[in-house]
Image (cartoon, rainbow, N blue to C red):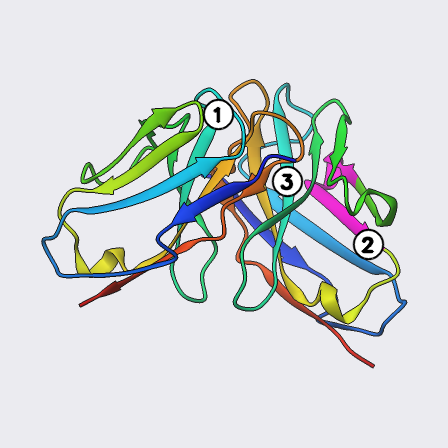
Amino acid sequence: DIQMTQSPSSLSASVGDRVTITCQASQGIDNYLNWYQQKPGKAPKLLIYAASNLETGVPSRFSGSGSGTYFTLIISSLQPEDIATYYCQHYESLPITFGQGTRLEIK
Amino acid sequence: QITLKESGPTLVKPTQTLTLTCTFSGFSLSTNGMGVGWIRQPPGKALEWLALIYWDDDKRYSRSLKSRLTVTKESSKNQAVLIMNNMDPVDTATYYCAHTLDGSGIRFDCWGQGILVTVSS
């Protein structure tokens, strides 16, 4: 199985900060990588698909990049409503696996 | 607009079988390309993919749980069903169903609200 490792596990940042979350795959997955946002008590929400494509309706301050084994999710200017846990997910092959999550808090 | 909602028991005893139903609207599981995935999340932990079922009845399972899982669909009712046998306390989790589209990569673009299932005697 392909393992997905996110860093950091938790992050505290101020409103307006640029925030970067990384996701590393245990083997190459091309660009078969999605990012989700999960707010407390809610279901996950798809943010980015195929590594760099913004899902419809997601604010443009979110962006994704990467290919192979290393991927990043960037929030260009952190907003209070971005407080959530973020997960990466690969789909290069079955089984699909998720990262362990990155918890984002406001400083 | 696609919506999904999970239903079923919220408390099951160890060794029992769990049956969850995902009732959805906004798409049909008899339409070319449509799929439903099942994902769970133990309290305070990460997401874990369980199974997928597609419009053509293609079914895929988590390798580690394959022996305990069955997914089916009832297209006429707009429902997908997850069956997990031999439940254990470690299976306590929120169970989600989610929409996916075959051919576009396995991404879950719309999720149900989830149902918390507790396994306890």
The quarter of the displayed image where residue B67 is located: top right
Q: Amino acid at mark 1?
A: Tyr
Q: Picture coordinates of residue B91 (x, y %)?
A: 73, 63
| Residue corresponding to mark 3 | B37
Q: Height in image: B47 above or below B37?
A: below
Q: Residue at x 45, y 66 (%)?
A: A41
Residue B92 located left or right of residue B42:
right
Whether residue A6 appears in magenta in the rendering, the answer is no
Indicate which label's residue lies in the foreground, 3 or 1: 1
Horizontal and vertical percent for residue B74? Answer: 77, 38
Queried whether the magenta region covers residue B73, the answer comes back as yes
Q: Are marks 2 and 1 in contact (CB under 8 Å)?
A: no
- Looking at the magenta stretch, what is its main secondary structure? strand
* Label 3 chain ID: B
| Element class at badge 2 | strand
Part of the protein shown in magenta: B72-84
Which chain does tag 2 point to?
B
Q: Quadrant of residue A70?
A: top left
In the visual, does A90 lie left or right of A6?
Answer: right
Mark sitting on residue B71? none
Disc 3 from disc 2: Cα separation = 14 Å
The total number of labels drawn is: 3
User: Is circle 3 on the same chain as circle 2?
Assistant: yes
Distance (Cα) linking label 3 and label 1: 17 Å
Report the residue marked by disc 1. Answer: A32
A94 versus A101 height, above or below: above
Tell me the chain of label 1: A
Q: Which residue is mark 2?
A: B84
Q: Quadrant of residue B88?
A: bottom right
